[in-house]
Amino acid sequence: MRRPLGILLLAWAIAWAAPAPAGNPPVPEKYISVDEAKALLDRNQRITFIDVREKVQYDDLHIKGAINIPLNVLPARLAEISRTEFIVLY
């Protein structure tokens, strides 16, 4: 009886001490309107616009100065995005 209890306690201790799975860090998320984005630009705040549509749609029409990073590749390209500027995804 002591052996199964010991094994159970050991398994519990190992599970408790295991590192948490690595995931994406929390990111503050806020939805803004077009008017709010324009107001930020009017105040000369540094903003990076990222167009998350496919390249064909980006080439057709996009915000001047926007960067195209399609949504399906965004996680792999996060290193390209500034961590100090205000980022607007559209």
Image: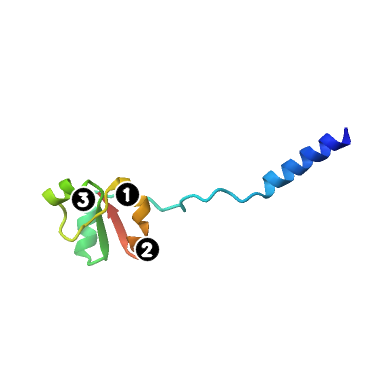
Which of discs 2 and 3 lies nearer the camera? The answer is 2
Is label 2 in contact with label 1 (beta carbons under 8 Å)?
A: no
**Quadrant in which the N terminus is drawn:** top right
**SS for dot 1:** helix
Q: Furthest-left residue in view?
A: 60
Helix, strand, or loop for circle 2?
A: loop
Measuring from the top left, give residue 60's x and y in whole percent: 11, 48
Residue at image location 34% in from the left, 56% down from the top: 77
Among all residues in the image, which is located at the extreme top? 1
Question: Residue 85: where, in percent of width, then height?
Answer: 32, 64
Q: In the image, is 7 to the left or to the right of 30?
A: right
Q: Say which label, 1 or 3, has the lower sequence index.
A: 3
Q: Amino acid at mark 1?
A: Val
For the residues marked 2 and 1, what is the alpha-carbon distance in whole angstroms? 18 Å
For the residue labelled by badge 3, is the local secondary structure a helix, a strand or a loop?
A: helix
Whole-percent x, y for residue 24 in the image: 46, 51
Q: Is residue 3 left or right of residue 35?
A: right
Q: What label sits on residue 28 in the rendered view?
A: none
Please state the total of marks drawn on the protein image: 3
Could you give the CA–CA distance between mark 2 and mark 3, rounded to whole angstroms?
22 Å
- Measure the C-alpha gap from mark 1 to mark 3: 25 Å
Give the numbered dot on residue 34: 3
Reading the image, the residue beneath label 1 is 73
Q: Is residue 81 visible?
A: no
Name the amino acid, label 3: Val
Which circle, 2 or 1, is nearer the viewer?
Answer: 1
User: Which amino acid is tagged 2?
Assistant: Arg
Task: Give the labeled residue for mark 2.
Answer: 83
Camera-side residue: 2 or 35? 2
Please tell me which residue is depicted at 22% across the width and 46% down the height of the picture: 54
User: Is the residue marked by circle 1 packed among few (<14), some (14-19), or many (20+) residues within 10 Å?
Assistant: few
Residue at x 30%, y 57% (from the top left corner): 87
